[in-house]
Image: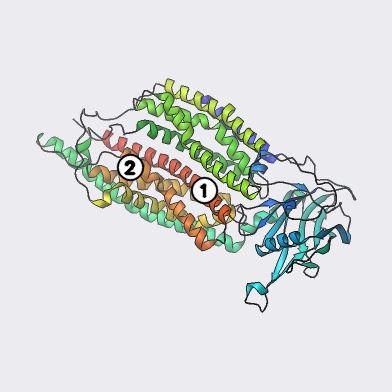
Amino acid sequence: MKNSSTILVLAVLITCCATHVRSDGSDHRYKEGDPVPLYANKVGPFHNPSETYRYFDLPFCSSGRVKEKKEALGEVLNGDRLVSAPYKLDFRKEKDSEVACRKKLTKEDIAQFRNAVKKDYYFQMYYDDLPIWGFIGKVEKEGKTDPSEYRYFLYKHIQFDILYNKDRVIEISARMDPQSVVDLTEDNEVDADFMYTVKWRGTDTPFEKRMDKYSQSSSLPHHLEIHWFSIINSCVTVLLLTGFLATILMRVLKNDFMKYAQDEEAADDQEETGWKYIHGDVFRFPKHKSLFAASLGSGTQLFTLTVFIFMLALVGVFYPYNRGALFTALVVIYALTSGIAGYTATSFYCQLEGTNWVRNLLLTGCLFCGPLFLTFCFLNTVAIAYSATAALPFGTIVVIVLIWTLVTSPLLVLGGIAGKNSRAEFQAPVRTTKYPREIPPLPWYRGTLPQMAMAGFLPFSAIYIELYYIFASVWGHRIYTIYSILFIVFIILLIVTAFITVALTYFQLAAEDHEWWWRSFLCGGSTGLFIYAYCLYYYYARSDMSGFMQTSFFFGYMACICYGFFLMLGTVGFRAALLFVRHIYRSIKCE
């Protein structure tokens, strides 16, 4: 496993390099009059963050030939399609109501702009890698109740306010002139002059801190209070419930050990009861062992991926508007950690006395990637039908396929071979009998689904407040940078998942039900189902998303994320339960 640790270190180094490279190659130092790169990125409905289009998909005019900027893999996955903007913002050169370009807007252009203004379209640009946003127009509703009486206007004058420190750009903001507009209410041809004003002001803010403005928006006092309240609430809930369960479990286990010790000293023919009674069946290997081992392998890989993403976040790689950094990290680290999935799955499969390890390896490779690939194919087709920037170009798809073929698959196979050759044995502390005991009839609440509902609710209750902020960031325009708090919440989630699974496994064994392998995995992973249920609540109650594309993207990709959580937390739950079961059966003498 020394090689795998070396690969993981390389993964972090490669990802750090890939996500820190400046995409335009500039050093951000300029002399007066130097051209500073300004790129128009995308436009789209404000409430539908996945539904974005190229800037010039709307009939804006251009001051010359539009040049496309080459983008990294992460930027393309993020839906960024940067092109040269019609405005020229040279360093420290002020301009007042300068005409960028003129265009005769046809009836079709007017109708297209009106439809965009109705849907609250915004634009996004980047100036020296600093983001700029603004709405493209406004709707005048004052005193009107009938939507047919609303008036629609397109902004045609934008003012850029730019702060600089010596030879560097520090901050930029854009304001639209509400008086300089084009009336879009009627389908009439209009001649429009698109103008812009540029104002420069000096500042003492150092260049290194120019991104702090965006980071601090999620660290405002009232936001921090809510985050800390969330953590304190989670910690108190966790401490009370885990303490309560731990006390009960310790007392019950202590009584069990004393009882079984007394039973051994008493008559040998006395009938055993409880979890000791099933000692000959508790380590009987589960059904569908290949699927079980593959689930553990995929869950372990996703857990490793999550830990490395947190490491990169905590050292500051994912600062706001580091375009595509998170997507680049996810692709690179997932590819380089596939050896862990192969090793874990095949090693455990061989411990369960499985023979067809090649089929197990193929199942491991497809268990998470298969549903993700099918979801991507459907959603990419939807994006192509909408002509949205979320549709990946053919070249990008080829790159991802090559990464999967040349990196992910070979590492998966190497991990599988290493796992097969590890020759590890499943060390059960008690012997397994030849024939399984019959499980006694159990009440309905001891069934798999009720137990999963009980197991998933407690971990979900510890994270649900923080979930809102994550959803508002991923599926909205909020900025989330408090990764340290998120990491604490993640640790709490792991602890609660492990503890509740152990408790439910004990009660299952005490009821003389020895089929705990799959149950512990399903109970651990059930939090993923609760998160998906929260998706329904968030979509209908907390967001204004609408339309087929945005709805399918939200529920499609969230299904993949929740499925990943299911595998990861299921693995955590099973590993905790396995440690516990081994411990209690090692502590008693069984015939």
In front of the other: 184 or 193 = 184
Which kind of residue does numbered mark 1 sit on? Gly
Q: Position of residue 344 (x, y in %)?
A: 44, 30
Give neighbour class at mark 1: few <14, some 14-19, many 20+ (Cα, 10 Å): some
In front of the other: 194 or 528 = 194
Residue 124 occupies quadrant = bottom right
Give neighbour class at mark 2: few <14, some 14-19, many 20+ (Cα, 10 Å): many
Count of numbered marks? 2
In front of the other: 79 or 173 = 79
Which kind of residue does numbered mark 2 sit on? Arg
Residue at disc 2, secondary structure: helix
Residue 290 vs residue 21: left or right? left
* Residue at the disc numbered 1: 556
Q: Nearer the viewer, mark 1 or mark 2?
A: 1
Q: Is residue 138 visible?
A: yes
Q: Position of residue 36 (x, y in %)?
A: 83, 48
* Residue at the disc numbered 2: 519
Q: Residue at x 39, y 53 (%)?
A: 458
Q: Position of residue 84 (x, y in %)?
A: 79, 48
Residue at disc 1, secondary structure: helix
Question: Image quadrant for the C terminus?
Answer: top left
Q: Position of residue 168 (x, y in %)?
A: 82, 49
Q: Earlier in the sequence, mark 1 or mark 2?
A: 2
In this rendering, the answer to whether 299 lies above or below 156 is above
Residue 359 occupies quadrant = top left
How far, Cα to Cα, is label 1 from label 2?
Answer: 26 Å
Q: Is residue 210 visible?
A: no
